[in-house]
Image (cartoon, rainbow, N blue to C red):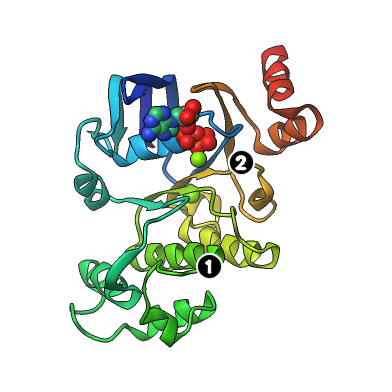
Amino acid sequence: TLLLEITDLAVEVNGKEILKDIDLYIDKGETHVLLGPNGSGKSTLFMSLLGFPKYNITRGEILFKDQDITHMTTTERIELGLGVSFQNPPAIRGVKLKDLLNIETSKKGKSPMGQELSPETLALADKLKLNDQFLERDVNLGFSGGEVKRSEILQLLAQQPDFIMFDEPDSGVDIENVELLAEEINVLLDKDKKPGLREKSGLLITHLGYILNFVGANTAHVLMDGKIACSGDPNEILEDIRKEGFKGCVECCKIQ
Ligand code: ADP
Ligand code: MG
Ligand code: MG
């Protein structure tokens, strides 16, 4: 069953067309990868699916769980089960990470609002090497690149969305922590379950694909100049990119 259906999408930012002719279909239980050079429009697609008003959808439609979300607000999309991990999330002065986690878990009925964090949430934080003192800090304020990413993953684990978009979760993260992040991304996307039993789906944006050594993906798409230039098996596409660069990989797609 299709979870996300993007048909003929075109998006403008500040009056300039950044994305066009985007068709992308993601089944329940599947993880897709979005690759592409810098400036090809990966983050623009992410922001458009999130529904930020600056990203003006000029054509096409987005269906999520059979509902037309093309013109829904960001809040409505999140309530419907969309989760995100930003490339560069903003700092939130005056809001502790602990408070944010509390809101996310209480929404899911896991703990009443205002209570201490549940033992499960604390255990997850510990696993991500984020200690109790860290949870008392203002969200993302002065966090290192790796701490920002791990705290994003922790929030998603508390929130349990059905479809998650990750914008370059491996950028700015130390190599030894990429594997740790990948492990939790696999949990978030049901990769610890057998393929037929997976409920969660994802779109993983990555520039270089290093994280794909650790996170399994069903299909990869290459974005070039705001269009999907090629789609196919993630390993084959990565190999083509490594050998021939992004342009060469697109040529390989055309030959097939
Ligand atoms: P990627 O994430 O693949 O590196 P982006 O989606 O960030 O690419 O950018 C795609 C294109 O959109 C680039 O040419 C970029 O300059 C342009 N762009 C991004 N943000 C804006 C903006 N706020 N105003 C105008 N153009 C933008
Ligand atoms: Mg999945
Ligand atoms: Mg980007």
Q: Secondary structure at mark 2?
A: loop
Q: Quadrant of residue 156?
A: bottom left
Amino acid at pointer 1 = Ser
Foreground of the two, 56 or 214: 56
For label 2, the residue is 207
Most distant residue in the top direction: 255
Q: How many marks?
A: 2
Quadrant showing the N terminus: top left
Give the numbered dot on residue 144.
1
Could you say where residue 110 lies in the image, as x and y percent from the top left? Answer: 26, 75
Precedes in sequence: disc 1 or disc 2 = 1
Quadrant showing the C terminus: top right
Could you say where residue 100 lies in the image, as x and y percent from the top left? Answer: 29, 70
Amino acid at pointer 2 = His
> Real-space Cα distance between discs 1 and 2?
20 Å
Can you say whether 58 is above or below 36 in the image? above
Q: Secondary structure at mark 1?
A: loop
Query: Residue sitting at 28 percent across and 34 percent down?
Result: 54
Query: Residue sitting at 19 percent across and 46 percent down?
Result: 76
Ligand 1 contact, mark 2 (Cβ < 8 Å)? yes
Graded by Cα atoms within 10 Å as few (under 14), some (14 to 19) or many (20 or more), the crowding at tag 1 reads: few
Could you say where residue 65 lies in the image, as x and y percent from the top left? Answer: 29, 39
